[in-house]
Image: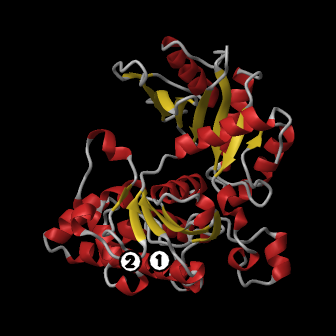
C-alpha cells in the first residue's frame, strides 16, 4: 500500500491544530483542533472532510499533549485513518523558530530535537509547545517519519545586510541577535502562487507578499528567494498588527522602564498584547474597525490610518529593495477579505505602477472560486496586484512529503 498521506500538526501551548492531507491530489481528508489542553474545560472538534460528515465535538479533559494526540488518533481511526495507518507517509510539524541552523524542512532525530530546544530562548512561547508535539508524535508511532517545517526557513536566504542589525557585532553574534522573519510557509506559498497566476516560474518573478492577519508581515521575494522581511528577531517588528505594535523606537522601552516604572516583562506584555490596533482603538478585528469608521468613530479611524500608513511604507521600501516588482500579493484574513485595506494601502502609489480595479477589488468570489488566486489590478497594469489565499497547512504537507519521498529517511539539513 502506497504511503501518500501527511498529517500536519501545529502544536501550541494549550492546543493542537491538525489536518490530514492526501498528497496524490492535495485533498483534505480530515481536520480539527484540540483546545485548552491541561484545563478541565478542554475539548476536541473534528471534521471528517472526505466523507462530508458532520463535525464531531466533545468536551473531555486532556491533561497533556500526549492525551490530546491520542484523541486525535482515535478521531482519525473513526474515519478509517489513524497514526498506525500504513498510508501515512509522514507527520509534518510547524516549528516557529529554526534560527540559522535550519534552512529547509528537516527529518527529526535526537540531534534536531536538541537544536530546536537550544533555540527556545528565541521563541519561548512557541518552540517548547512545538517540541512537545514532535516528541509526543514520535512516541505514539516511532515508525512514521517526523518532519519539522520552520516558520523562519524561507527567510534564511536574506542577504547579510538585510538580516543584520547595526549592533556591536560581537554582542549580536554571541546572543544570536539578528533578523529571522516569520510566517515563512505562507510567504513561500503565496509568492509561488502569485508567480503562477502571472504565468511565470517563481524564478522569474519579483513579488511583494503582504500577510495581513492578526499577526502581519511583509516580504520582498526576488526570483523565489526572500531578500527582506518585516519581522525580525521576534514577530514583534514591522507592520502594525492586531495586538502588536510593530516598529517602535527602541528607546521607548527605556523610557517606559525609567519614567513609567514599568518592568521589562510589563513592557513586553504591552508591546505584544496591548498595542497595535487593540491599543489604538480597543479592537483588533478589522471588520469591527471598518464598522466603527463608517459610524464616524475617530479612534477607529486613527487606528486604521496608522495601520495603512505603516503598510504603505513597507510596500514602498520593498519596491526600492526589489527594483522591479511583478506583483503585490495580499493574503491572510485581512489581506484576503478587506477591500478597504487593500484600496487604502495602494492609494496614491500609481507612480510605482500600483493600481486597483475597483470592481475586482470589491468582488467576493463564491463557491469553488473563493479559494483561488485572483487579480484585482486593471488589465495591462505595470504591476499586478493579486489576492492569493494562503494555505500554510498544504505548504507544510508538500514540503514534508517532498522530503520523505525524494530525499529518503537519511536526509538532514
Q: In this view, does 85 lie to the left or right of 210?
A: right
Task: Please name whichever residue, 404 or 39, is drawn nearer the observer in this view of the structure.
Answer: 404
Query: Outermost residue toward the left?
Result: 295
Specify the quadrant that holds the N terminus.
top right
Query: Residue at horizontal 51%, vertical 75%?
Result: 325
For residue 171, above or below residue 41: below
Task: Please name whichever residue, 3 or 306, is drawn nearer the observer in this view of the structure.
Answer: 3
Residues at badges 2 and 1 in contact (C-beta under 8 Å)? yes
Percent of width and height locating residue 122 = 70, 60
**Does dot 2 land on a helix, a strand or a loop?**
loop
Q: Is residue 3 left or right of residue 289?
A: right
- Sequence-wise first label, 2 or 1: 1
* Residue 281 in sight: no
Percent of width and height locating residue 264 = 61, 71
The residue labelled by disc 2 is 354
Q: Is residue 357 left or right of residue 176?
A: left
**Does dot 1 land on a helix, a strand or a loop?**
helix
Quarter of the image for residue 12 reads top right
The residue labelled by disc 1 is 315
Residue 207 is tagged as none
- Badge 2: how crowded within 10 Å, few (<14), some, or many (20+)? many
All told, the count of numbered labels is 2
Percent of width and height locating residue 259 = 53, 86
* Residue 251 in sight: yes
Query: Residue at horizontal 19%, vertical 67%?
Result: 292
The colour scheme applied to this rendered structure is secondary structure
Quarter of the image for residue 69 reads top right
- Badge 1: how crowded within 10 Å, few (<14), some, or many (20+)? many
Quarter of the image for residue 336 reads bottom left
Query: Residue at horizontal 55%, vertical 52%?
Result: 189
Q: What is the spatial separation of the Cα atoms under label 2 and label 1, in whole angstroms? A: 10 Å
Amino acid at each position: 500500500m502506497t504511503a501518500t498521506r501527511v498529517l500536519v500538526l501545529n502544536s501550541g501551548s494549550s492546543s493542537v491544530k491538525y489536518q490530514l492531507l492526501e498528497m496524490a491530489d492535495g485533498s483534505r481528508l480530515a481536520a480539527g483542533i484540540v483546545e485548552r489542553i491541561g484545563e478541565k474545560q478542554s475539548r476536541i472538534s473534528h471534521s471528517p472532510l472526505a466523507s462530508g460528515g458532520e463535525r464531531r465535538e466533545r468536551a473531555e479533559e486532556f491533561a497533556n499533549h500526549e492525551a490530546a494526540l491520542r484523541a486525535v488518533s482515535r478521531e482519525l481511526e473513526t474515519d478509517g485513518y489513524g497514526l498506525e495507518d500504513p498510508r501515512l507517509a509522514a507527520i509534518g510539524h510547524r516549528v516557529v523558530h529554526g534560527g540559522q541552523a535550519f534552512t529547509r524542512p528537516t527529518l527529526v532525530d535526537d540531534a534536531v530535537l536538541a537544536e530546536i530546544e537550544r533555540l527556545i530562548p528565541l521563541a519561548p512561547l512557541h518552540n517548547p509547545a512545538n517540541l512537545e508535539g514532535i516528541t509526543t508524535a514520535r512516541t505514539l508511532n516511532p515508525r512514521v517519519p517526523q518532519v519539522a517545517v520552520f516558520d523562519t526557513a524561507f527567510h534564511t536566504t536574506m542577504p547579510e545586510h538585510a538580516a543584520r542589525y547595526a549592533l556591536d557585532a560581537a554582542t549580536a553574534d554571541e546572543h544570536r541577535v539578528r533578523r529571522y522573519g516569520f510566517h515563512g510557509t505562507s510567504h513561500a506559498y503565496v509568492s509561488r502562487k502569485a508567480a503562477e497566476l502571472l504565468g511565470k516560474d517563481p524564478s522569474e518573478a519579483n513579488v511583494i507578499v503582504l500577510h495581513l492577519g492578526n499577526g502581519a508581515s511583509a516580504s520582498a521575494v526576488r526570483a523565489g528567494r526572500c531578500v527582506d522581511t518585516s519581522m525580525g528577531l521576534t514577530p514583534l517588528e514591522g507592520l502594525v498588527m492586531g495586538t502588536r505594535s510593530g516598529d517602535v523606537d527602541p528607546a521607548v522601552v527605556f523610557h517606559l522602564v525609567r519614567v513609567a516604572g514599568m518592568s521589562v516583562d510589563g513592557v513586553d506584555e504591552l508591546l505584544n498584547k496591548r498595542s497595535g490596533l487593540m491599543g489604538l482603538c480597543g479592537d483588533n478585528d478589522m471588520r469591527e474597525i471598518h464598522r466603527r469608521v463608517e459610524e464616524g468613530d475617530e479612534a477607529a479611524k486613527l487606528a486604521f490610518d496608522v495601520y495603512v500608513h505603516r503598510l504603505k511604507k513597507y510596500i514602498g521600501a520593498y519596491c526600492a529593495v526589489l527594483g522591479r516588482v511583478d506583483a503585490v500579493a495580499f493574503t491572510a484574513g485581512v489581506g484576503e477579505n478587506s477591500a478597504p485595506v487593500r484600496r487604502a494601502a495602494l492609494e496614491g502609489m500609481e507612480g510605482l505602477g500600483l493600481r486597483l480595479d475597483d470592481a475586482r477589488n470589491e468582488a467576493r468570489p463564491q463557491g469553488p472560486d473563493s479559494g483561488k488566486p485572483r487579480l484585482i489590478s486593471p488589465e495591462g497594469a505595470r504591476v499586478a496586484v493579486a489576492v492569493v489565499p494562503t494555505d500554510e497547512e498544504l505548504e507544510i504537507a508538500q514540503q514534508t512529503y517532498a522530503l520523505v519521498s525524494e530525499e529518503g529517511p537519511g536526509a538532514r539539513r
